[in-house]
Image: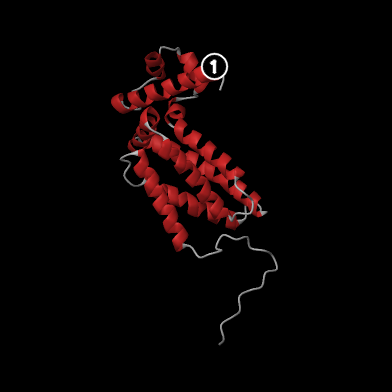
Amino acid sequence: MGLRERKKQRTRDALIDAALDLFLTRGYEATTIDQIAAEVEVSPRTFFRYFASKEDVALSLTADEQEMFLTELVSRPLSESPFTSLTQSMRAMLGILREIDGAEASRIMKAQRLVHTTPPLLAGAMRLIRQNERRLVAEVARRMGAAPDDLQPQFIVSVFVSIGLLCMNGPTEDLHGLARRYEDLLALAERSLCPGWDQPVRSGAAEPASAPG
């Protein structure tokens, strides 16, 4: 990035850090945008150049991760089965998480704690997940040559999203532990699912033979 972009990124990160610290110490509802801006020594007007609301800044890391994941999924080879593309995209993300340390790792874990202890933010995170789920369904359907309202892409993505939700329900002691738990769940899913379960169903395919009566 150029100097201007790096400066903007530093300001954005500073606003996120200030917001997370204030939300966790003073409470999400009690914290104002003016207070967040004051911590970074910028105006509220500058805050709104980066974020639309308190919820937006609190959930910004979740939204960033979703964008990164979708970008990774789109880049996967079309020769892969849909669920393989989803799991390999997530493994690429987990590889990035394992390399994160210091301030960035602390930022991610603070955001996790905040969301899971603040009902309005947990509801907001679920809205983001559902919105992103629709985008994943559209991409999986495209890769399969199916319509987005086809049940099979929806089912495949629902299985994958359920793994992520199960991972988030566990303890969040540190970022590396979170990555390990997610990898364990992906491996469990791969062992448990029947081979070929996510292959496109072609029209005109032969029906399974009936059992002799």
Q: Residue furthest bottom?
A: 213
Image quadrant in which the C terminus is located? bottom right
Q: In the image, residue 28 lies at what x, y percent?
A: 35, 27
| Residue found at x 46% / y 18% | 11
Measured as percent of width and height from the top left, residue 126 is found at 45, 41
Residue 178 position in % (x across, y down): 37, 43
Q: Which residue is mark 1?
A: 3
Residue 88 at least partly seen: yes
Quadrant location, the N terminus? top right
The structure residue drawn at horizontal position 54% and vertical position 16%, both measured from the top left corner, is 3
Residue depicted at x 52% and y 49%: 88
Q: Quadrant of residue 34?
A: top left
Image label count: 1
Task: Give neighbour class at mark 1: few <14, some 14-19, many 20+ (Cα, 10 Å).
Answer: few
State which quadrant residue 171 falls in: top left
**Amino acid type of disc 1?**
Leu
What SS does tag 1 mark? helix
Q: Is residue 148 visible?
A: no
Determine whether 81 is above or below 61 in the image. Answer: below
In this rendering, the answer to whether 31 lies above or below 171 is above
Q: Position of residue 13 (x, y in %)?
A: 44, 23
Pick out the residue farthest to the right.
204
Q: Look at the image and name its color scheme.
A: secondary structure
Does residue 184 appear left or right of residue 84 in this picture? left
Residue 59 drawn above or below residue 130? above
Q: Could you tell me which residue is drawn at 42 percent across and 58 percent down?
A: 188
Side (left or right) of 123 relative to 77: left
**Which of 32 and 19 lies nearest the eye of the viewer?**
19
Determine whether 58 is above or below 140 in the image: above
